[in-house]
Image (cartoon, rainbow, N blue to C red):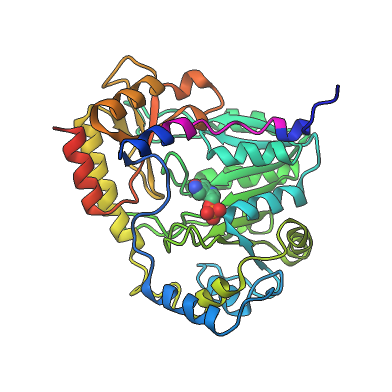
Amino acid sequence: MRPAVSARAGRIPKGNLAELFVLARSRGAIDLAVGTPEAPETPRPLVEEAVRALRSGANQYEFPQGGANVRRAIAASFATPADPDTELTITVGGTEALCVALFSLVDPGDEVILLDPYYENFLGAVELAGARPWFVQMREPGPDDPDWRLDPEELAAAFGPATRAIVLNTPANPTGQTLTIEELELIAELCERWDVTVIADEVYSRLVFDDRPHLSVTDVPALRDRSVVVGSLSKSHAISGWRLGFLRARPELTTVFRRVHEITTNGAAAPLQLAAGLTDLFDAGTLTAAKELSQARDETADILTRMGLTFRMPQGGCFILADIRGATDEDCRAYVRRVLDRSSVLLAPGTPFFADEERGRNYVRVAFNRTPETLAAARSRLLP
Ligand code: PMP
């Protein structure tokens, strides 16, 4: 008998947090596993405008490419500005943006390079596009180098005639690492040599810490025309349920992306786009997410250090990827389970973020986009 589902669908990795979630929720545990924002608070003007938009009757389809105001606001927010009319498409979260990019850029059988560890949806989306993932292992932080590092030789060896795209993520989930100009220039050179497109997930571009600016692939001249950028308002504006993301690309690609996006969703929620377009979306006064989250990062880092975990301090994003070997001999699943049983705090096992289970077993991922109250409660449970 033929399998009921496509081979592509069958290859999507199974999310394996579900069971732990049910258990954690039934026990009233503090969830530091998922990235759903508890902090920062959703900006009040966004909520007010959304209610007004619904009441005003903005309840039908928007143009698939997205509302003009919100496209304009997002396009103007980049260090290297984009043309909102020809280079930007509003999508249903960064999640849809990634799928649209992959469906538009790769054919079944093509190879797509992923830097490992990776955000687990990258792998699922590559599989769904029928492409083959090619993993490049980032070197783990060690005594000689505290960063997650790209190995230039391993990276170069990953490129070949079948390579169609490379997915980057800066700042990254789960490591919190940002890619350096040197790394981006090396990637540009290889992409040029092998005619490869960069899909850069920059959904955490507004969450870069320690007063550093976000370095986008579109700020690197050698990459600008080879790159598409996946973005999102989910975390920066704490509106993950609104499902507002975007896709930035040069005009010829944008034309194709918009066609594909008409097939995948035909557009994001009209009243919510309208609301986002009517507020000062990126006004420094209304967007203090990075400052707030850097304090939450420091607090979380202190708790984890006291638990005996080691990690690279995230430069951005909302996660810490922590090595548990200083605290336990267990693998991450057993450790997560024991922490849940003992302290009623849920951490995420590291294995789903690594191609190689053996590497992932030593890590847990901890989300720190939480309020000071939640982190204080987590501290008292984890460090009694
Ligand atoms: N990319 C990365 C790296 C993420 O961590 C997430 C959310 N966890 C997404 C994309 C998806 O975000 P969105 O809510 O915009 O679909």
* Relative image position of residue 160 (x, y in whole percent): 74, 33
How many labels, in total?
Answer: 0
- Range of the magenta residues? 10-20
Residue at 49% across, 82% down = 52
Quadrant of the rendering where the C terminus is positioned:
top left
Q: Is residue 17 visible?
A: no
Residue at 61% across, 30% down = 135
Quadrant of the rendering where the N terminus is positioned:
top right
Q: Is residue 376 above or below residue 231?
A: above
- Apparent side of residue 124 relative to residue 351 in the rendered image (left or right): right
Q: Residue 11 colored magenta?
A: yes
Q: Residue 220 colored magenta?
A: no
- Apparent side of residue 44 relative to residue 114 in the rendered image (left or right): left
Residue furthest to the front: 26
Nearest the camera: 154 or 331? 331
Q: Is residue 268 above or below residue 13?
A: below
Q: Is residue 208 above or below residue 379?
A: below
